[in-house]
Image: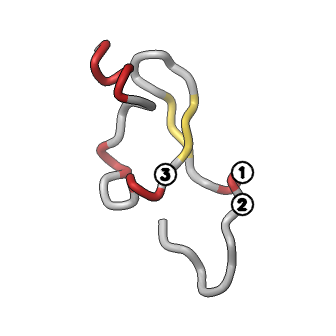
Amino acid sequence: MPRKAGKAVRKGDLPSKICAVCERPFTWRKKWADVWDEVRYCSDRCRKAR
């Protein structure tokens, strides 16, 4: 999700998903920018518990 020139994006405006393990919502993170479509888990703990 690229930033708009000079405009900050509010946390509430970021896309979110539901974790496949704990079923809690989690929001987009900058480190997931290139792989957001592939992200399924909110954390390493959930990824390992699958």
In this rendering, the answer to whether 6 lies above or below 40 is: below
- Residue 22, given in percent of the width and then of the height, sits at 48, 16
Going from N to C along the chain, the mark reached first, 3 or 1, is 1
Residue tagged by mark 3?
29
Residue for point 41% across, 30% down: 43
Residue for point 31% across, 53% down: 35
Left or right, 31 with reference to 38: right
Residue 39, picture quadrant: top left
Badge 1: few (under 14), some or many (20 or more) residues near its Cα, within 10 Å?
Answer: few
Residue for point 57% across, 30% down: 25
Left or right, 33 with reference to 38: right
- Residue 45, given in percent of the width and then of the height, sits at 37, 20
Q: Tag 2's secondary structure?
A: loop
Identity, as a three-letter code, of the amino acid under mark 2: Arg
Instruction: Determine the CA span between mark 1 and mark 2.
Output: 5 Å
Badges 1 and 2: C-beta atoms under 8 Å apart? yes
Task: Tell me the number on the disc at residue 12.
Answer: 1
Task: Tell me the number on the disc at residue 10.
Answer: 2
Residue 8, picture quadrant: bottom right
Badge 3: few (under 14), some or many (20 or more) residues near its Cα, within 10 Å?
Answer: few
Q: What is the residue that sits farthest to the top in this orientation?
A: 49
In this rendering, the answer to whether 21 lies above or below 34 is: above
Badge 2: few (under 14), some or many (20 or more) residues near its Cα, within 10 Å?
Answer: few
In this rendering, the answer to whether 17 lies above or below 48 is: below
Instruction: Determine the CA span between mark 2 and mark 3.
Output: 12 Å
Identity, as a three-letter code, of the amino acid under mark 1: Gly
Instruction: Determine the CA span between mark 3 and mark 1.
Output: 12 Å
